[in-house]
């Protein structure tokens, strides 16, 4: 995308590097094509953008905008990393750890978790605010999967993959702020959620140990987060 | 050169972090030349010295009243305090009981046999705090070593950096929880 400058392409500068992309692409696309890493959490290839987590915030001509949901425009000057942005990203991860109950040591997703990896990437040394230590009930009513909402980061990838790729609309958000939760069928237990097709796309899309397969032990839950993107690409090919 | 005096304390944790200190293997020989233990469950020195401690490594979360005293003493009497492992850094596994009333929990677990004259035996067993806390919620902590347990290499890296008078550079995988 960035190797050949084509006349109809959008030209912009990212971290001092000239980048050109097809019109209509996001700053995240442009940076990725140029080999520049921007950390993300709620973004997943194949799903519409939610810009919910604010991990991918970048400086665009002095304004902070989410790279995943900002269209690359001719002449933009983008900086993906400043000390302030790094502090912001670290704070986002820190607050996610404080708000949920992300205890890596006994999590099925230990070692295969995007939140755990982000903590390393942003340099999270300690969580400076008190942990909530919240205790939601785990819904293990479904025969194959379970949801532990204490490990949810509200990225909404389950909600979007269920609606946009599977077309089932089983997952949705309930409540607001720290009470916000992902729910199945208006908060039926999962087994009673009749819209669920048990396709498992929510499991593969979930970045943490919140939505997982049953029967896996500590650190055994390996997911395929590329699945939605591959399905959508295959469909688009026809 | 005077040896650096290192203390280690063990709060609510499984001792795995202390095992990980021993897992630095041959680096123990270098360490033995440069440090001496002031107070540590690895030794028979059970009382925290009045002064002269350079570095204290704290394993475990703060779960009872005795732990509160220990960390406050450690902070007052040490130049540098390090949270060693996820229980100290996040409260980790011991925090599973947070949200449950400690008295009800003990009554549930140990039953009537655990009581003395109808009371729980807090004269000999330190009283549990309402909730388990990471060490840095109670005292100032200078460095955090993540992991359950922290990899021996990370412990060695941090200690050798401090011995060389440098700030430990812990980045990327060195900061992995779990």
Image: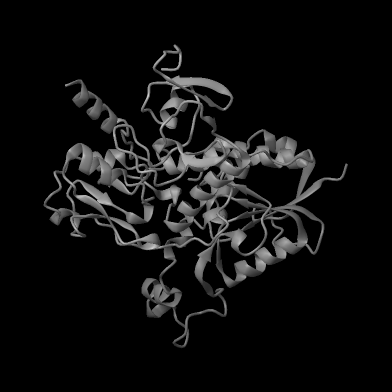
Residue A191 pos. (x, y %)? 15, 54
Q: Is residue A162 left or right of residue A206?
A: left
**Scheme of image coloration:** one colour
Q: Nearer the viewer, residue B38 or A52?
A: A52
* A110 relative to B147 in the view: left or right: left
Residue A136 in the image: state x and y as whole percent.
33, 62
From where the camera sits, is residue B176 visible? no
In the picture as drawn, the residue positioned furthest to the bottom comes out as: B117
Q: Quadrant of the N terminus of chain A?
A: top left
Residue B59: x percent and y percent? Answer: 59, 54
Q: Is residue A209 above or below residue A7?
A: below
Q: Quadrant of residue A230?
A: top left
> Along the line of sight, which residue is nearer the eye, A20 or A214?
A20
In the image, residue A32 above or below residue B98: above
Whether residue A235 is situated above or below residue A163 in the rendered picture: above
Q: Residue at x 55, y 54 (%)?
A: A127
Q: How many marks?
A: 0
């Amino acid at each position: 995308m960035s190797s050949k400058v084509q006349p109809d392409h959008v030209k912009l500068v990212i971290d001092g590097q000239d980048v050109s992309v097809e019109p209509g692409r996001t700053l995240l696309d442009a940076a990725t094509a140029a080999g520049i890493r921007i950390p993300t959490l709620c973004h997943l290839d194949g799903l519409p953008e939610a810009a919910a987590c604010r991990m991918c915030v970048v400086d665009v001509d002095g304004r902070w905008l989410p790279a995943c949901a900002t269209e690359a425009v001719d002449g933009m000057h983008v900086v993906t990393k400043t000390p302030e942005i790094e502090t912001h990203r670290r704070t986002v991860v820190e607050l996610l750890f404080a708000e949920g109950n992300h205890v890596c040591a006994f999590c099925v997703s230990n070692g295969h978790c995007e939140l755990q990896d982000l903590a390393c990437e942003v340099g999270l040394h300690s969580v400076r605010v008190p942990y909530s230590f919240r205790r939601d009930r785990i819904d293990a009513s479904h025969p194959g999967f379970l949801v532990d909402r204490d490990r949810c980061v509200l990225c909404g990838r389950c909600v979007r993959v269920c609606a946009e790729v599977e077309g089932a609309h089983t997952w949705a958000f309930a409540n607001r702020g720290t009470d916000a939760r992902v729910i199945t069928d208006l908060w039926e237990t999962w087994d009673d959620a009749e819209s669920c097709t048990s396709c498992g796309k929510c499991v593969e899309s979930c970045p943490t140990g919140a939505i997982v397969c049953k029967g896996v032990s500590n650190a055994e839950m390996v997911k395929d987060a590329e699945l939605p993107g591959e399905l959508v690409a295959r469909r688009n090919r026809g | 050169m005077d040896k650096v005096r290192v203390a280690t304390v063990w709060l609510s944790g499984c001792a795995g972090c202390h095992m990980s200190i021993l897992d630095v293997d041959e680096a123990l020989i270098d360490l033995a030349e440069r440090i001496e233990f002031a107070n540590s469950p690895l030794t028979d020195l059970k009382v925290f010295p009045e002064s002269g401690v350079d570095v204290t490594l704290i394993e475990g979360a703060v779960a009872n009243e005795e732990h509160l005293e220990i960390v406050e003493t450690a902070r007052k009497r040490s130049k540098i305090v390090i949270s060693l492992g996820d229980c100290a850094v996040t409260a980790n596994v011991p925090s599973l009981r947070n949200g449950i009333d400690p008295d009800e929990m003990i009554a549930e677990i140990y039953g009537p046999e655990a009581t003395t004259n109808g009371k729980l035996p807090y004269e000999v067993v330190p009283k549990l705090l309402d909730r388990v806390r990471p060490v840095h919620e109670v005292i100032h902590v200078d460095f955090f070593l993540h992991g359950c347990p922290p990899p021996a290499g990370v412990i060695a890296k941090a200690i050798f950096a401090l011995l060389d008078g440098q700030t430990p550079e812990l980045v990327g995988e060195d900061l992995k929880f779990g």
